[in-house]
Image (cartoon, rainbow, N blue to C red):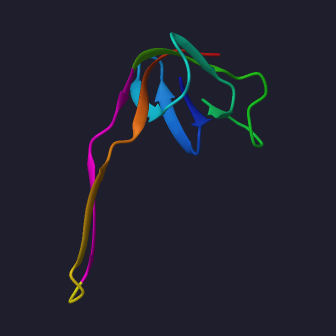
Amino acid sequence: MFAIFKSGAKQYSVKVGDTLAIEKIDAKDMVEFTEVLAVADKIGAPYVAGAKVKAKVVAQNRGEKIIVFKKKRRHNYRRKAGHRQAQTIVKITDIA
């Protein structure tokens, strides 16, 4: 069985046992997603009534470093910065 749920501004397709990195959420051990767009053969309008995706929080960390480089040629303008997005690693435990 699979489900498609929404967290933040993104949508994720998952099965029980999947591990994925999502946008940072404030949770310590368990989290429950109620904005479920589809479960197996049921498609919501916009959400499936009564559907939930339960997950266990594995870690709170930061993603890969992204280099931001700005340059304007012939103006001696160069700026270099880095960015690491905060993320939460979750393991899907149940789809109800």
Q: Residue at x 35, y 33 (%)?
A: 62
At horizontal 26% and vertical 45% (from top left) the residue drawn is 65
Residue placed furthest toward the top = 29
User: Which quadrant would the C terminus be assigned to in this image?
Assistant: top right
Residue 23 shown left or right of residue 64 in the figure: right
- Judged by its main secondary structure, the magenta piece is strand
Quadrant in the picture for residue 85: top left
In front here: 64 or 34?
64
- Residue 63 painted magenta: yes
Q: Nearer the viewer, residue 53 or 38?
A: 53
* x, y percent for residue 44: 73, 38
The span shown in magenta is 60-72
Residue 72 at x, y percent in the picture: 27, 82
Residue 47: which quarter of the image?
top right
Q: Depth check: 77 or 13 in front?
A: 77
| Residue at figure coordinates x 51%, y 10% from the top left | 29
Q: Is residue 73 left or right of residue 94?
A: left
Name the residue located 58 percent from the left edge and 17 percent from the top edge: 31
Picture coordinates of residue 3 (x, y %)?
Answer: 57, 30
